[in-house]
Amino acid sequence: MNEPFFEINTEKEDTNYAKFVIAPLERGYGNTLGNSLRRVLLTSLPGAAIMNVRISSVKHQFSTLKGMKEDIVDFLLNLKKVRVKYEGEKAVKATISVKGPRDVIAKDIEADANVSVVNPDLFLSTLAKDAKLDVKLEIESGVGYSSSEDRKTGEIGLIPLDAIFSPVLRVNYKIEETRVGKYTNYDKLVLEIWTDGTIKPIDALLKASAILISYFNQIVSPKKVAKEDVKIVDELGPTGKLSVEEIGLPTRVANALLKAGYETVEDLVKIKREDLVKVRNLGEKSVKIIEAALGEKKLTIGA
């Protein structure tokens, strides 16, 4: 097969949207590229989100705050719409400290210089005269989605939020026929990308392509994965060789374990519980699910 000779042209572009035309492609490669790029764009690009919230004098989300028009649930729903640009590895703190009468908007979020709010005019709440709103926020970077249910600690006043990290909101693609000389059996891929403003559509396309390349490179030129030379726990027998996907764990929990390098039952019985809680996209609820699955095998974490 000949080397690919297609071009990428940008038909339309603004801050959060772009329409790309990729052509000419050998027949069938329009769908091959379009489907692969769409899946990676929607699920695998890193982003940032508000993870946890503390509101002064508020003990739980089903509360009200004196002088604030909205209840706490509505305020939290508005906070989840805040789009944050942050590329650091560690969680960072942010605050809101305002006094009424006034509307509170996303621009009122104060954070380090390496954190920026890309929708600063987003409405959050309305405060009456003399009402005060003091909020502490925790922002993290990540991939995909993190459920607040998995990060509940029971700590009074700490309210976890559902976190959507993906900076890409929507992707559409379609395939059209195109001509090369006298031949008409070529594909033209029309790809549309909408983002939340924390990344340009062209940069999202380039990052998604790089991710796909890294996976294909591992097939073409595989690198050996260095593993610790750990003595196998013989007492586990065949059970120790079961993958985390084979012991009845939810797909989301199993995927989080695999990404963190915990692939088998043997890995789970060696890890300390406090270390497992720290695994990205896991939390206290997920750890309890893992403990229950191991319990059915008469095993425990850190055994």
Image (cartoon, helix red, strand yellow):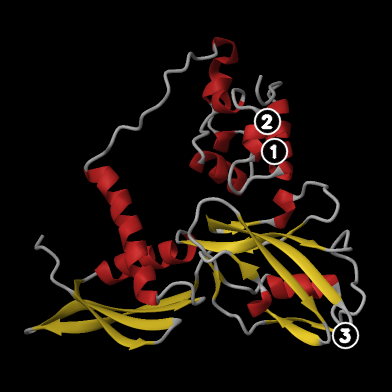
Mark 1: few, some, or many residues within 10 Å (few <14, many ≥20)? Answer: some
Q: Nearer the viewer, mark 3 or mark 1?
A: 3
What amino acid type is highlighted by mark number 3?
Ala
Q: Position of 161 compared to 14: left or right?
A: right
Circle 1 SS class: helix
> Quick one: label 3 or label 2, which is nearer the N terminus?
3
How far across and down, in percent of the image, does residue 6 sit? 17, 73
Q: Residue type at mark 2?
A: Arg
Q: Is residue 58 above or below residue 233?
A: below
- Is residue 219 at least partly visible in the picture? yes
**Residue 245: x %, y % from top left:** 56, 38
Residue that numbered label 3 is attached to: 128
Image quadrant where residue 233 sits: top right
Residue at the extreme left of the image, as rendered: 181
Residue under the image location 54 percent in, 57 percent down: 141
User: Label 2 belongs to which residue?
Assistant: 273
Say whether marks 1 and 2 touch (CB < 8 Å): yes
Residue at position x 43%, y 23% in the image: 228
Q: Please tell me which residue is depicted at 10% across the width and 60% down the height of the picture.
A: 1
The quarter of the picture where the C terminus appears is top right
Residue, disc 1: 287
Q: Residues within 10 Å of mark 2 (few under 14, many from 20)?
A: some
